[in-house]
Amino acid sequence: MTPPPTVRGWCPGLHTPMEAADGWLVRVRPPLGQLTATQADMIARAATHFGNGRIELTSRGNLQLRGLSPETAPHFAQALHACGLGGEDASERRRAILLSPLAGLDPACDSHTLPIARALDAHLATADHLSALPAKFVMGVDGGGYVPTGTIRADITARAHDGKWQVACGDARSDCAPDAIPALMLRLAEAFMQVGGNSRPLHHRGIGMAMFAHLGIVARSRDDDGPAPACPTLVGTLPGRCYAVVPPLGRMAAADLSRLARWCASHGAGLLRMTPGRTIILPGQVRAPDVTGFVTDPHDPRLRVVACIGRQGCACTGADVGADALALAPDVPVGVRLHVSGCPKGCANPGRCDLTLVAAATGYDLCRNARAADTPTLRGLDMVGVRALLHEGHASADTPQHQNGEKTPA
């Protein structure tokens, strides 16, 4: 019997590994998302030497390595520190910054974006008192451009807006000069520790106004903001002479990353940038890299599916959800996104999705425009049943029935 899902209570980091079904896992946070080709190749080699060679690209642009042990995890951290990644202690955890994917590359992205992010990162590196922030607390720097303003979602966000900059937090915002933004964001983080508790502004928007008020700043409400704009598919040729590739489901073998790193070392700028959308951007390249293991076509159906690690690395499910997601990808209609989750936690996609399948003892339960934890409208689907729904344009997903016609309990 599959054990019920459990909440671990923390996010793994370089110095804070977390136990999973396939061993210990650690996360590497590339500085502002960027690695040199040498660093990427070193991570790939270390993933094989110290772990099981499986690497995942997270929704925050971090690299997650699997299959380590309590003995090998410290050696992995030391190896990364030797090549200029991570710190010697847990300070790397608080330096969680989401950055516009094309900052410094796209001419339409505000030119202050990258300097603001660099200054913010330098401030966070020495802000030991902010180590008490919640593990998932994140700051963002959103410069707009090809990836429009509003796509970066963070607890505290610096955002380019109509040629000016503002700092937004929860339901509040205030205009700010670019050179004053890093200091204001740190002061807001300090205010959060005084007034916010563990209710992060990203999820409890009302805290933002209280944080500004704690600093004596009269902020404006963000209630007039419209829905977040859609992020364009970041695959293929992009503005600023760069090319983007995606590991299917955000996963790659260490050998895949190593080959990509070596390609980047001999072509383009020799850099790899990891983005919040599980995309790898290759600055200075204008054509697809001659390596396998990555999606390079923006119309590839594998871009329509997302899935967690499933039974390969999690004890919460017995389903191979990744393999099922890839098998279903060609059947997913254009413009529809499918989330296949091993349990109701929905780790791979915590938000709503057009269609969500959740593995259960009797097959897959299905929700439409919902999260994995929401009440399903269909239960007990097998792969044949799922495909039938996808080919029907998933219209019948609104019908509250079991696959065998039994009504779903309220």
Image (cartoon, rainbow, N blue to C red):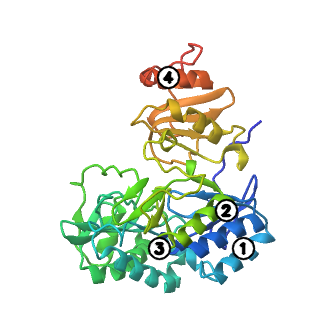
Which quarter of the picture shows residue 187?
A: bottom left
Asked which secondary structure carries label 3, the reply is loop
Whole-percent x and y of residue 178?
27, 79
Front position among marks 1 and 3:
3
Tag 4: amino acid:
Leu
Alpha-carbon span between mark 4 and mark 2: 35 Å
> At 52% across and 64% down in the image, what residue appears?
136
Q: Taking 20 as reference, is 62 left or right?
A: left
For marks 4 and 2 on the same chain, the one whose residue lies earlier in the sequence: 2
Whole-percent x and y of residue 264?
54, 68
Q: Is residue 76 visible?
A: yes
Q: Is residue 315 visible?
A: no
* Residue behind mark 2: 65
Tag 2: amino acid:
Leu
> At 58% across and 37% down in the image, what residue appears?
325
Asked which secondary structure carries label 1, the reply is helix
Tag 3: amino acid:
Ala
